[in-house]
């Protein structure tokens, strides 16, 4: 793989258990060292054991840049240091970020914020939670970051099988290969990430951007706010045409749109009239009683 690859910010998930098998920590060290050699930033949970510790050792030994993200609950009272954080973060060339809150959501957000890709080493439920949350977000289009699992000794074979089964049973919107990728070694995983991101068709510019549609209440507020946009465009926007406002100066609302709008107004007016009639009859009965 070319050494001219632009530096990337790569978020890495992996075990934090001191009982992690050596075959997994060896792969983690290799990953950290490889990221350092290629000039990529390694972002991880700052752990001092398991795959995270080995990864940090490898990246540090290779003079790489490391960003650790740790939760504030591990801050030692009366100190500026952190329980459980790897000692390499005492060095000024590395960064450590502190997440707040009464759960792990802020920490997970900081880990992936600004990341170009996710590389997942073997790990337990915490690693799986991080992996599947980001896989789900990619599946439904909230991000386009490539995700690759380092499938050491077939550790993630069952995840591959689960995705295959879900695809076979037509439970997925995308093909499994477009959700999570699997490679057997750290080098193959990093090579795949670099190749994926080097392809212009895989960058966010080549992907459709999801836009949140305004709520009915927001459309009502917009149309009742005294806007100078012509009445017909405002009413059409209220009933669902999100592009009416932007196109008002360049394209007239056609006759069919006006007809539909008039139908909506007629139904709305009839409803108001019926409500007033019922209210007035109720008031009359109450006063006569």
Image (cartoon, rainbow, N blue to C red):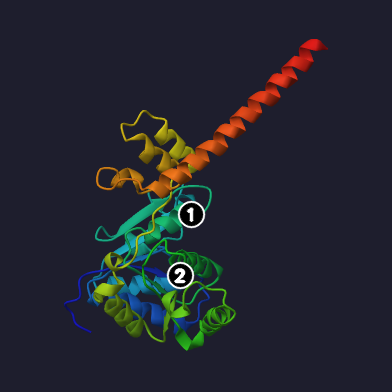
Q: Residue at x 59, y 30 (%)?
A: 272
Q: Is residue 110 above or below residue 278?
A: below
Residue 124, horizontal then vertical, whole percent: 54, 72
Give the number of the mark in front: 2 or 1: 1
96, above or below 247, in the image:
below
Q: Residue 221, position in %: x, y?
A: 43, 34
- The quadrant in which residue 88 appears is bottom left
Tell me the residue that label 1 is attached to. Answer: 105
The answer to which quarter of the image holds residue 166 is bottom right
Which quadrant, please, contains the N terminus?
bottom left
Q: How many residues crowd mark 1 within 10 Å: few (<14), some (14–19), many (20+)?
A: few
Label 2 environment density (alpha carbons within 10 Å; few <14, some 14–19, many ≥20): many
**Secondary structure at numbered mark 1:** helix
Q: Secondary structure at mark 2?
A: loop
Tell me which corner region of the image, top left, top right, bottom left or bottom right, holds residue 65.
bottom left
Q: Decide if residue 241 is in sight here.
A: no
Tell me whether the residue at label 2 lies in contact with that at label 1, contact meaning CB atoms closer than 8 angstroms: no
Q: Closer to the camera, 179 or 99? A: 179
Q: Is residue 47 left or right of residue 201?
A: right
Residue 49's tag is 2
| Residue 72 seen by the camera | yes
Q: Residue furthest left?
A: 4
Cα separation between marks 2 and 1: 22 Å
Residue 227, compared with residue 186, is above or below; it is: above
Using the image as rendered, state which of residue 145 and residue 171 is in the foreground. 171
Residue 38 image point, x, y percent? 23, 76
Q: Earlier in the sequence, mark 2 or mark 1?
A: 2
21 and 207: which is toward the camera: 207
79 relative to 164, above or below: above
Give the position of the C terminus as an image quadrant: top right
């Amino acid at each position: 793989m070319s050494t001219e690859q632009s530096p990337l910010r790569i978020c890495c998930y992996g075990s934090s258990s001191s009982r992690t098998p050596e075959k997994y920590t060896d792969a983690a060290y290799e990953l950290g060292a490889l990221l350092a050699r290629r000039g990529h930033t390694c972002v991880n949970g700052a752990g001092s054991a398991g795959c995270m510790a080995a990864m940090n050792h490898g990246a540090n030994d290779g003079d790489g840049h490391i960003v650790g993200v740790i939760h504030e609950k591990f801050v030692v009272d009366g100190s500026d240091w952190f329980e459980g954080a790897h000692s390499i973060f005492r060095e000024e060339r590395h960064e450590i970020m502190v997440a707040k809150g009464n759960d792990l959501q802020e920490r997970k957000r900081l880990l992936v914020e600004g990341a170009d890709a996710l590389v997942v080493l073997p790990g337990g439920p915490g690693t799986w939670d991080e992996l599947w949350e980001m896989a789900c977000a990619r599946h439904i289009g909230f991000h386009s970051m490539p995700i690759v699992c380092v499938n050491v000794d077939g550790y993630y074979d069952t995840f591959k099988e689960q995705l295959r089964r879900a695809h076979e049973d037509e439970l997925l919107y995308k093909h499994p290969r477009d959700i999570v990728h699997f490679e057997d070694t750290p080098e193959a995983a990093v090579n795949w990430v670099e190749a994926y991101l080097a392809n212009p068709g895989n960058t966010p510019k080549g992907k459709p951007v999801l836009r949140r549609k305004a709520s009915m209440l927001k459309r009502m507020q917009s149309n009742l706010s005294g806007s100078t946009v012509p009445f017909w465009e405002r009413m059409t926007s209220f009933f669902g045409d999100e592009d009416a406002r932007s196109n008002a100066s360049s394209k007239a609302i056609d006759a069919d749109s006006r007809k539909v709008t008039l139908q909506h107004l007629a139904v709305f007016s009839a409803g108001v009239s019926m409500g007033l009639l019922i209210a007035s009859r109720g008031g009359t009965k109450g006063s006569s009683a």
